[in-house]
Image: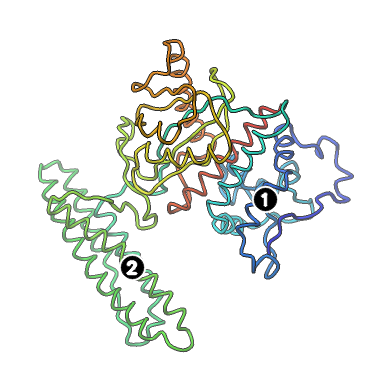
Amino acid sequence: MLRLSGGQVESLFDEVLPIEVRELPADLAVLDGLLADPGLLAPVERAWDEAARCFGRPSVPIDRFVRLMIVKHRSGWGYETLVREVSDSLHLRRFCLLALSERVPDESTIRKLARRLGPGVIEEICRQVIAVATSGPREQRFVVRAARVDSTVIEADVRYPTDLGLAEDAARSLAREAKKAERLGGVKAPRVRDRSRGIGQRLRRLNRTLAARTGQGKQVALRLTGQAGELVEQTVRETRRLAGRLRERARGRGAQAKLRAAGRLNELADRAEKVCRQIRQRVAGEPITDRLVSLADPDARPIRKGKLRAPTEFGYVVQIAELCENTRGGARGLILPAPSEIGSPNESDLLGATARQIGALGLRPRDLALDGGFAPGSVDQHLPGPDRVFIAGRRSAGSKRTDRRLARFRVGAEGRISHLKRRYGLNRSRLKGHDGQRIWTAWAILAYDLDTLAIRAR
């Protein structure tokens, strides 16, 4: 059952507290006023299954959940730390609308609800915040006069991938999942052997060969990697047989459990087969496209941006569009929900989604500053409105003075991205999958936008 509000927060215990404790700090007080708008929770109500709005176990009040997630991304805490710190802080309790006698929701409840709401709901809340800020009273309205757009990589929460490491993970994951499903297959169910130990031995042998610097590292690597791929192929065949056995026995009582187990086995087997195909291509010297870099996060991809610090990153490309009131140094604006795609899209490929959001909000920035990776033709197609468009190294906005002003303004996008990564956790997505990355990014951007409005209101 959906609960948008948790009801009254004050209790008799509050009357004995000093006034300094009952009043929120300045920053939290402004955020409290911004989040008090009931219209911000309308996207949650629209997205919630209509049949479950009035039936079932009551959910965590959504207004409390949103405030807990804002605190999480402002502070950089994990879920367990968030619950512990909010429980111990009177100010955070009052901000999160939790009475002194109430218990903070369990960390697993908060994590599951974040996944259930999905990325679209949080992105819609971000757009709602921007719409309210840009359409308020004239003396308080956030007037968008300039915009700067740049793309960055949000790393997936994976270790550096190698073919041997992926093969070991695939063998271990298949054996672990098969062990859970064997009891559903009956006495004669096919067995899936765990070959991760043999692959691990080959991995350690390769490490010793590379450390010895004998000059045979490449040949040994190809030979051992090919052997690991053959072991994984054997495990995949055994897994397919077990999944087929489960589907055959999926009749009567427990049929759905057998079908779900077979589906999980086939899904893991598909990823393991992709690892085997990559190994065969590498041994044959063929190029590999759409490379899988993690079994736990199959949507992550290798991305090369030419950075000296990290030539290859593994994750997702997102586009950050900041809407500002001016182009002066230190300008801080509102950020739109960041569009992204699986793979390594060009900056111009994501510009259409950014332009649609600007158009849907009814905004028309006069100045637009872009990185040199944007194609002028794509900019003219998707963003025809601005009076002055500056593309670093590719298009002038008019006079040299205007170019210098917009060039300095564009460089600020790099600083803003760095700020988001250091302060709001956009350096690495802790949620798996493309949807998980979008959820993580949307919460970080929502926290940043609310902080921006709070700073502006003080």
Closest to the observer, 126 or 106:
126
Where disc 2 sits, the SS reads helix
Whether residue 358 sits left or right of residue 274 in the image: it is: right
Asked if the residue under mark 2 is in contact with the one under mark 1, i.e. CB atoms within 8 Å, the reply is no
In primary-sequence order, the first of circles 1 and 2 is: 1
59 lies above or below 93 = below
Residue 174 numbered mark, or none: 2
State the residue at coordinates (29%, 64%): 171
- Disc number at residue 41? 1
- Residue 191 vs 457, above or below: the answer is below
On the image, the x and y values in percent for residue 338 come to 48, 41
Q: Quadrant of residue 324?
A: top right
Q: Secondary structure at mark 1?
A: helix
Give me the residue at 67% from left, 27% from top.
456
User: In which quadrant of the rendered image does the C terminus lie?
Assistant: top right
Q: Residue 54 versus residue 443: which sits nearer the camera?
A: 54
Amino acid marked by disc 2: Leu
Question: Looking at the picture, how far across and down is residue 297, in whole percent?
Answer: 39, 54
Q: Identify residue type, mark 1.
A: Leu
Q: Residues within 10 Å of mark 2 (few under 14, many from 20)?
A: many
